[in-house]
Image (cartoon, rainbow, N blue to C red):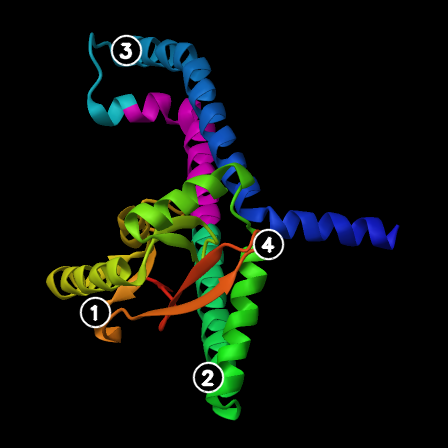
């Protein structure tokens, strides 16, 4: 019984904002129906008030006095419903703000960890670590075998190699000269516009956009965007270039 109660409490707390907004919307519908149902009674009260006062038309004050009791439940339900919607929205906003904060804290912790690791490694060990990391990314997301022939043709005709984006692990075809030119273009955009999103990079690389790529990126105050590279071989023996970023994109 205690476990069941605990699970129910946890579920209610987790879905509290949605439940509150749902109750609020349901209450607004109920208030609308209640107001419609109260209208005939209010019209009768108006006619009774006209007879009692001996007039053909009631003034605003007399109109309110004759009908307010009919619409009181509607007003109360509407007020409570609006409070539920506003309260649920505030909770949802706070929850999203907390998630963003948690993301930034995790990103900062990861960045600090990487910096500390690099401090205790010499250049040779750092290069080995980068190579093993790149190898893991490529092994998990290999180039489809049907595309191997196309990659080889690209290498011969255009000097391109199979490349991987280290964040999304998406493959694309390019070379260091083209990527260096792209790096210059992105930094020019960064200087002109003050911000370069992750999706801006992906569009130039001609790979799929990220669902959160418009909110992640590089603000100008963090300095230039700098590409880093790691080379390795995939399981087919194809030379691959893994595109890294000196500074990871942040939520903006």
CA distance for labels 1 and 2: 21 Å
Q: Residue 6 placed where, x, y %? A: 78, 54
User: Is residue 76 highlighted in magenta?
Assistant: yes
Q: Earlier in the sequence, mark 1 or mark 2?
A: 2
What label sits on residue 79 in the rendered view? none
Instruction: Using the image, tell me which numbered label, if any, was put on residue 235.
Output: 4
Mark positioned earlier in the residue sequence (4 or 2): 2
Tell me which residue sits at (49%, 91%) in the image.
122
Residue 158 shown left or right of residue 248 in the figure: left
Q: Verify CB contact (< 8 Å) between mark 4 and mark 3.
A: no
Distance from the alpha carbon under mark 4 to that under mark 3: 92 Å
The answer to whether residue 208 of the structure is visible from this angle is no
- Which one is in front in this view, the residue at disc 1 or the one at disc 2? 2
Question: Helix, strand, or loop for circle 4?
Answer: loop
Q: Nearer the viewer, mark 4 or mark 3?
A: 4
Q: Is residue 152 magenta?
A: no
* 2 vs 3, front mark: 2
Q: Mark on residue 115? A: 2
Mark 2 or 3 closer to N-term? 3
The image position of residue 227, as x and y in percent, is 32, 68
Query: Residue 31, percent across and down?
Result: 45, 26
Residue 75 position (above or below residue 239): above
| Residue range of the region highlighted in magenta in the rendering | 64-89
Q: Any mark on residue 220, and which?
A: 1
Asked whether the residues under the numbered discs 3 and 1 touch, taking CB atoms below 8 Å apart as contact, a structural biologist would say: no
């Amino acid at each position: 019984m205690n476990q069941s109660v605990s699970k129910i409490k946890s579920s209610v707390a987790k879905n509290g904002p949605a439940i509150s907004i749902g109750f609020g919307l349901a209450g607004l519908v109920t208030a609308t129906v209640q107001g419609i149902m109260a209208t005939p009674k209010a019209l009768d009260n108006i006619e009774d008030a006209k007879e009692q006062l001996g007039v053909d038309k009631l003034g605003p004050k007399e109109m309110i006095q004759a009908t307010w009791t009919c619409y009181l439940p509607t007003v109360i339900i509407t007020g409570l419903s609006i409070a539920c919607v506003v309260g649920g929205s505030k909770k949802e906003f706070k929850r999203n703000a907390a998630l963003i904060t948690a993301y930034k804290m995790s990103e900062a912790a990861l960045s600090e960890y990487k910096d500390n690791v690099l401090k205790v490694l010499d250049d040779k060990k750092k290069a080995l670590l980068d190579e093993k990391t790149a190898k893991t990314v490529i092994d998990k997301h290999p180039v489809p075998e049907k595309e191997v022939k196309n990659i080889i043709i690209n290498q011969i005709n255009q000097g391109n190699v199979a490349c991987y984006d280290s964040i999304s692990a998406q493959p694309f075809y390019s070379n260091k000269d083209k990527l260096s030119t792209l790096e210059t273009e992105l930094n020019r955009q960064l200087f002109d516009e003050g911000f370069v999103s992750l999706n801006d990079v992906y569009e130039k690389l001609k790979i799929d956009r990220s669902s959160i790529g418009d909110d992640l990126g590089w603000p100008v105050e963090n300095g230039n965007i700098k590409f880093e590279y790691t080379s390795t071989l995939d399981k087919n023996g194809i030379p691959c270039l893994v595109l890294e970023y000196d500074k990871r994109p942040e939520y903006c």
